[in-house]
Image (spheres, helix red, strand yellow):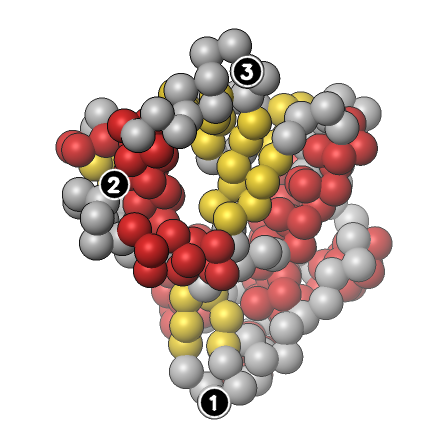
Amino acid sequence: MKRWSEDEINWLIENYPILGKVSCANFLNKSIASIRAKASNLNLKQDRDSLFYSEWQAKAAQSKIGKKRPEQAKVINQLREQNKLKMTKEGKLRNAYSRGAQGRRADIDNIYFRSSWEANYARYLNFLKSKGNIYKWEFEPDTFWFEKIKRGVRSYLPDFKIWETEASTPYYVEIKGWMDDKSKTKLKRMKKYYPHVRIYVVEKKQYTEIKNKLGRAIAGWE
């Protein structure tokens, strides 16, 4: 079997639950046995509510290993650009949180954000700063490396770094509309290797509370 690179392992962790072993084998140009063994080693399981579980698995099974059907390639390329997709039991495609608003925001120092959630949270922090509730914030300034980890998730880049006062120790905030396995692993390893670092996760519930309470009062809210 071909040796697995770190990029291939990270890709498999993120996409195996959605695509399954056949499509992953086609995309990575590896055997199904190799994909199955690596998925078992990483304790990966396919989401049976996935859009691709029945439809694309069946089509992938008809093709030879190492060759992607055109429609498979199109879907996989789309998936690479728009991750975190899941399929509801009713069969409707939903996105865990908006990835359609990627880009720079002129009203926030022209910073590039990957979602409207991140951009809106930055506006929320500017609102808190204007009220004197925080001293300052930065977007993705620090990367934490897990030096003892040789495979899989080896680093973590939190979204926001925040100082409550000029002299205070900063803490970090992660915006997560959907907590996938990779994100869970990152947070677990942060607790293990950087127990002194404070990290708060803003999920859908917390984000919605901010939106309902202050969304209309914050300029530029999307």
**What is the spatial separation of the Cα atoms under label 2 and label 3, in whole angstroms?**
31 Å
- Does 215 sit left or right of 20 as displayed? left
Q: Secondary structure at mark 3?
A: loop
Distance in Å between CA atoms under marks 1 and 3: 48 Å
Q: Which residue is mark 1?
A: 90
| Disc 2 element | strand
Which one is in front in this view, the residue at disc 1 or the one at disc 3? 3
Q: Please state which of residues 2 and 165 is positioned toward the viewer in this rendering.
A: 165
Could you say whether the residue bearing mark 1 is in a helix, strand or loop?
loop
Question: Badge 1: few (under 14), some or many (20 or more) residues near its Cα, within 10 Å?
Answer: few
Residue 72 as seen in the image, left or right of residue 20: left
Q: To which residue does mark 2 refer?
A: 103
Please report the residue visible at 38 percent of the width from the left and 52 percent of the height from the top.
210
Give how far across and how far down residue 53 sits, in percent: 58, 79
Q: Quadrant of residue 48?
A: bottom right
Judge by depth and name the residue closer to the eye, 154 or 151: 154
